[in-house]
């Protein structure tokens, strides 16, 4: 579905972008999108190299000890 974009569809998308962002902001938007794509590709390449960085730290498993009468007396 998305792989079959022709020139008319791309032209319509370009016109919509120009209407939304204006001609002055269009280069800034393009540069921003380009930087985002490069950063994404770079992070994908780093993951492929085995330099994996975890996004979230692992949670420690805690075991809850219930206090018994023998524990309280000590």
Image (cartoon, rainbow, N blue to C red):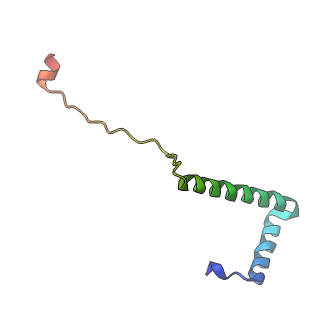
Is residue 12 depicted above or below 56 in this figure?
A: below
Q: Residue at x 66, y 83 (%)?
A: 4
Q: Which image quadrant: the N terminus?
A: bottom right
Between 56 and 13, the one nearer to me in the picture: 56
Q: Is residue 44 left or right of residue 17?
A: left
Measured as percent of width and height from the top left, residue 24 is found at 88, 60
Q: Residue at x 36, y 38 (%)?
A: 60
Farthest residue to the top: give it: 74
Q: Residue at x 51, y 51 (%)?
A: 50
Q: Is residue 65 left or right of residue 5?
A: left
Measured as percent of width and height from the top left, residue 3 is found at 64, 79
Q: Is residue 33 left or right of residue 23?
A: left
Q: Is residue 6 left or right of residue 65?
A: right
Between 31 and 17, the one nearer to me in the picture: 31
Q: Which image quadrant: the C terminus?
A: top left
Quarter of the image holding residue 19? bottom right
Is residue 68 depicted above or below 62 in this figure?
A: above
Between 18 and 2, the one nearer to me in the picture: 2
Measured as percent of width and height from the top left, residue 35 is found at 72, 55
Is residue 21 depicted above or below 71 in this figure?
A: below
Quarter of the image holding residue 16? bottom right
Measured as percent of width and height from the top left, residue 61 is found at 32, 39
């Amino acid at each position: 579905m998305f792989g079959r974009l022709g020139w008319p569809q791309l032209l319509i998308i370009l016109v919509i972008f120009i209407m939304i962002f204006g001609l002055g902001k269009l280069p800034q938007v393009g540069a921003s999108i380009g930087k985002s794509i490069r950063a994404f590709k770079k992070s994908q390449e780093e993951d492929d190299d085995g330099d994996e960085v975890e996004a979230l730290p692992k949670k420690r498993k805690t075991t809850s000890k219930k206090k018994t009468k023998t524990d309280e007396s000590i």
